[in-house]
Image (cartoon, rainbow, N blue to C red):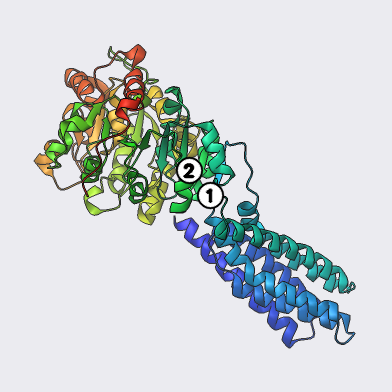
Amino acid sequence: MRGDLVRKLIARVLASGLAVSAFLVVALTGATAAGLAVAVAALAATAWERRVRPNADGLVETVLVAAGILVGYARRADDGFDPALAATALVLLGLVLLVGPLRQAGALEIRAANLPVRSWAPPVAARLGDAVLVLLALVALAAALALPAWLPLVATLLVGAGCAAVAFDLARRRFRPPAGGGPIGRALRRHQPEFVLHFSAPPGSEYQVTMWLPYLERIGRPFLVVLREPEFLSTVAAATRAPVVLCPTLTALDEALVPTLRAAFYVNHGAKNAHVIRFNQLTHVQLHHGDSDKAPSANPVSAIFDKIFVAGPAAIDRYARAGVEIPADKFVVVGRPQVEAIEVRREPAPASAHPTVLYTPTWTGHHADANYCSLPVAETLIRRLVDREAVVILRAHPYTDRNPASARQLAQLTDLLAADRAKTGRRHLWGAAAARDLTLTECVNRADALVSDVSGVISDWLYSGKPYAVTDTGADGPHFVERFPLAASGYVLRRDMSNVDEVLTALLDTDPKVAQRWAARSRYLGDFPADSYAEAFLTAARRELEPDLAVPTPRAP
């Protein structure tokens, strides 16, 4: 996160500083060639800023650069008033002023992937800003070479024609929409999806939806994925064969939710879920994106859904323990299908001189009561593991970099592991090697033991039957296990790390809680046969798609 902020700040300073410098050099000095060179540098800086700050408004900088280039052109030509150059200036000004509004209008249009339709205007509108930057660079080159002014005029008119075509198409969509719906809506009607997966979340959250896509495909019914934020479109589309539709507005959402739909699935409690829940003809099913004893796992908002699929009976108890009253018939125990590929170890592992330990610190959360992050005190843990000659897989939460302090603490841990790897050759893993190159399931299968903060990782790990430790990072003291019952079948690591040696001995050597773990496994993950574990979810999902269950009782106003 800190690195991103630094890059954004540098990009802003460069784009603004070079734009002002280019205009001043051309307007106030005779160094026209130097001014044009600075203008091209300013254009490059503006393009870079748009990469690191996609929503950056570079209007002022672009106007300054365009003005500098045109003044420089007039000086290089030195032929007095040139109608072609004047026309170029007018068209360029119009383009610079229109690019922002057209990009915003295009961003509000429905878009789709994995559908046999092509909607050209929105993606072109998103690239118009880049086209104008390239055009300005070409005009600067023409000025530097003192080329006839009609050449940049032709190029400017071509870009202007493209801009006008985009504006016309977007206006037609907005003010004269097709009576039978747009091409995406018609394609979805032909596809006849029976259910929709709705997803809205902050950047970096795509794992919440991609973890469910393979199992939704195994249901064997046509479906679609509806996204509300554009940054997820390419990633989610690459993870499924189903149509993926971006619906930035309610109008777009209305077009995507075609009449054949019977159910809607959700993987979080995002506020925009309400935009779909208003469709009473659908059965609304909350899947969650993990099972843990965290406070958000017993969110009272769950009560608005018709069905709540949970991994095991412990999840139902969690809501009751939190004082959230939800009718029992809303809960459906389906297991946690994502764990089906985890290897189960029913017998104690042979003693190893270099056991592999998976450490999964969580992030600091949206609120203080959801902060279970152990990174501030984790250095002691990592040093003790290194002293025991363990191989460490450090897999941090995707949101860790959102907190600058957490990012620094994580960097210190990776430096420590890198130093030990260089010294001993032990193949510790961290960063992309642990979080992107390996799935969580692969990390679990490689490891002999787990140290984790309170998170859904523990529930998934529980399926393996292997020992785990839980960090107590709060002020709960003796009430920690009462608040987080899954810790009872693990080994609790105190916040001050005063019992770290005792916990690591139990975790890696003696393991006295084997029986408790197996009992917890059934309560948290359901008691389903290992060879058909995911079938519980698939059967429950198909049941919600049956016609006689597809129309729930309308909600009371």
Q: Which mark is residue 110?
A: 1
Q: Is residue 484 visible?
A: no
Single out the residue that lies furthest toward the left: 478
Residue at the image point whose x is 42% and y is 26% from the top = 215
Viewer-closest of 248 and 426 = 248
**x, y percent for residue 533:** 33, 17
* Among the 4 quarters of the image, the one containing residue 339: top left
The reply to whether dot 2 and dot 1 touch (C-beta < 8 Å) is yes
Helix, strand or loop under label 2: helix
Cα distance between the residues tagged 2 and 1: 9 Å
Q: Nearer the viewer, residue 539 or 269?
A: 539
Three-letter code, disc 1: Ile
Q: Which residue is mark 2?
A: 256
> Reading the chain from its start, which is encountered first: label 2 or label 1?
1
Residue 471, placed above or below residue 31: above
Q: Residues within 10 Å of mark 2 (few under 14, many from 20)?
A: many
Q: Residue 149's spot in the image, x, y percent?
A: 86, 74
Tell me, yes or no, if residue 544 can be seen here. yes
Q: Position of residue 90 (x, y in %)?
A: 74, 77
- Amino acid type, residue under disc 2 in the picture: Ala
- Where, by quadrant of the figure, is residue 209 drawn? top left
Query: Dividing the image into 4 quarters, which one contains the N terminus?
Result: bottom left
